[in-house]
Image (spheres, grey):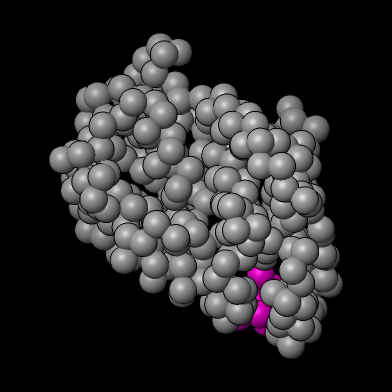
Amino acid sequence: MNKDNLIDGNAVAKSIHEELTRELAGLNAPRKPCVAFIRVGEDPASVSYVKKKQSVSEAIGMESKLFVLPEETGQEELNALIDSLNADDSVDAMLIQAPLPKQLDERATFNRVRADKDVDGFSSANLGLLCQENKNAFVACTPAGIVELLKRSGVQTAGKRAVVIGRSLIVGKPLALLLMQKGLDATVTVAHSKSENLAEICSQADILIAAVGRPKTVTADMVKEGACVIDVGINRIPCAEKKSGYRLVGDVDFDAVAPKCSKITPVPGGVGPMTVAILMRNTLAAFKRHMGK
Ligand code: NAD
């Protein structure tokens, strides 16, 4: 494995930010796109994700609003905020940072966001449109970001065997739907916590995508020589040398797996920045719809 095989998510995301900035400037719109972020509680990862998303949105010329609700917020209170943002014509896009505290119903919360503002693509309306391969679907940012990374890195998907480990609503499920769509045309297998013979399933993959949330789920013996490996996992492991006391690793045993791969994403700096870039792309798309552009 040499550096050419490393997929640089930061660089790809940066070029998307530049494209969006140019497109936005060329729109000559009467106002800026506006994205509202809702965070419930002080989960440190959520704090840092929302901060990042907000800073990128402002850097590319969008407006943002941040709503922070206390950990003990009830469903009615959260619903009231969502309803008011749904009704606010100056807000184009809404993002509710997951995971939500236990007393809140994530599915009901995501479904409450108006489909044309649901830039996270988690509502049943947008997931339904995705199933229908409807171009108006807002597609979940991480899966759409992975597809964009594959495309821009020249990874062929048509006819190839893709294995997705993980079946969540946020990553695994929409990603499998995207990869099997006409145009991408991969043959997709979804593995999960109850899958038997995970190593054997993975070893057949031309494109192997891990979205599990457990370090070293993918080891070298599970990877076919020449495969493309996409590591979605973000895991914090203790690290005395770091000021924060932890470092981030993915789901893939990177050092052992990388030498076998044609391409591989690092953690951090792989899929993560793409999630933010696609959120911006979706927000611009929502804005254009609202402006009739
Ligand atoms: P999740 O907990 O909702 O889903 C994890 C999935 O992994 C489940 O479908 C489960 O069946 C499967 N799984 C668990 N143990 C397994 C095992 N031993 N073998 C096979 N499958 C197993 O998590 P999620 O929201 O999909 O996130 C997965 C990981 O991706 C997390 O580390 C999360 O932080 C990360 N993530 C990263 C980004 C990003 O932008 N890079 C975005 C979303 C999630």
Is residue 104 inside the magenta stretch?
yes
Where 255 falls versus 47 (above or below)? above
x and y percentages locating residue 180 in the rendered image: 25, 52
Pick the front one: 172 or 220: 172
Residue 217 visible to the viewer: no
Residue at position x 73%, y 77% in the image: 87
Q: What stretch is highlighted in magenta?
A: 98-106
Q: Quadrant of the N terminus?
A: top left
Task: Work out whether residue 230 or residue 182 is closer to the camera in this orientation and state it.
Answer: 182
Q: Residue at x 33, y 65 (%)?
A: 131
Is 263 within the magenta? no
Q: In this view, does 13 lie above or below 2?
A: below
* Residue 195 image point, x, y percent: 26, 60
**Residue occupying the point 76% across, 40% down:** 61
Can you give x and y, in whole percent of width and height, for residue 214 in the image?
A: 48, 49
Kindly identify the residue that appears in the image at 31 percent across and 29 percent down: 155
